[in-house]
Amino acid sequence: MDQTPQSPPKHSPIPPMVFGACMIVAAALSGGMVYYGSKLGDAGRLFMAIGGLGFIVVFAMAPIGFLLVLRTRERAPSNMEGGELVRSIERLVEHGSLSDEARRVLYRRHDRELLRKAIQEDIAAEDWDAAMVLVKELAERFGYRSDAEEFRARIEQARFDTVQRKVTEAIAHLDDLIVSRRWDQAAVEAARIGRLYPDSPRVEGLRHRVEQARVLYKSDLERRFLLAAEEDRIDEAMELLRELDAYLTEDEAGPYREVARGVIGKARDNLGVQFKLAVQDRRWDRAAHIGEQIIEQFPNSRMAQEVRGLLDGIRARIRQMPVSR
């Protein structure tokens, strides 16, 4: 028996009316997504972006839909196509007629995930206040109170840990300023730390800490100066006296004046002896160096006047000295 070859089944193209209905449904859904995204504020940005993308796709496909509609003029739609169009339109009408409350219930799981993600991003960015606003939204608007409490605990712990770390770093920097005896900068830094972290008990008394360190160092300077003067360590005593001068007020300097005069006199006499010995030994470089010290440290003394009269001759002798190779 001869068998008539059967042609492979043909796939009919998408009916134009069904395609048009799908375009309408897609446009409506895109509009709904943009609407609900605008209701959510910052948490709905992703939702609005998807809706906008849907609009772009719909407008891009519109020419194709227009061509399909033109082709329908050449043939009447089948009962199947007409039925599909009716069902699509019914679904569109049903979805579009939902109230705001019903739509919120429909999308609540998606909204919840968006809010959770936004809260986690704010925590990572250390934007605690913004995170707390979203947590309140999660609890009061969407009813996820358990999730909200969990996030509150995480935010408070993260805030505490971050503040503790920053306070530790700030105090370490303050200690560096104290150790290097930069008292004015240390006082400014202590005040700044207090303003930045007023709720931290660790910042209490930082100004007093700076002042106390300054007082202790000043007291140590006084003790070391007196001891060096008593033991005739004149060079050391002079260095300490110069540093101590920045810490003493006029009244505080009174008890040290007599000792300071003795130290200064001995230091001047020592330099004078060293200058004379250098001149006698014809060590002109050393004589010039010591002479400059005398003029710098004791500019108004008689010794300084005498040295000024000799320095030009000493420098002339230095210029006449042969250059060593």
Image (spheres, helix red, strand yellow):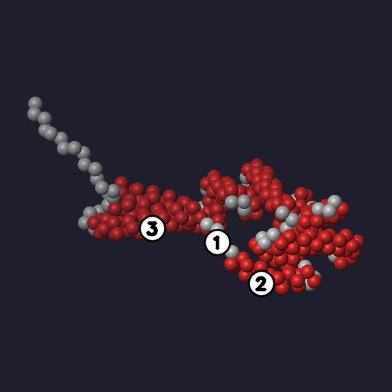
Amino acid identity at mark 1:
Val
Q: Is residue 50 above or below residue 307?
A: above
The local secondary structure at tag 3 comes to helix
Does 246 sit left or right of 139 as displayed?
A: right
Provide the residue designation for mark 3.
Answer: 56
- Specify few, some or many for label 2: CA neighbours under 10 Å numbering under 14, 14-19, or 20 or more: few
The type of residue carrying mark 3 is Ile
Farthest left residue? 2
| Sequence-first disc among 2 and 1 | 2
Looking at the figure, which quarter contains the N terminus?
A: top left
Q: In the figure, 294 relative to 137: above or below?
A: below
Q: If you read the primary sequence from the N terminus, does the residue marked by circle 3 or circle 2 appear first?
A: 3
Residue 323: which disc? 1
Residue at 52% of width from left, 57% of height from top?
325
Q: Is residue 27 left or right of residue 281?
A: left
Q: Which residue is mark 2?
A: 312
Q: Is residue 31 visible?
A: yes
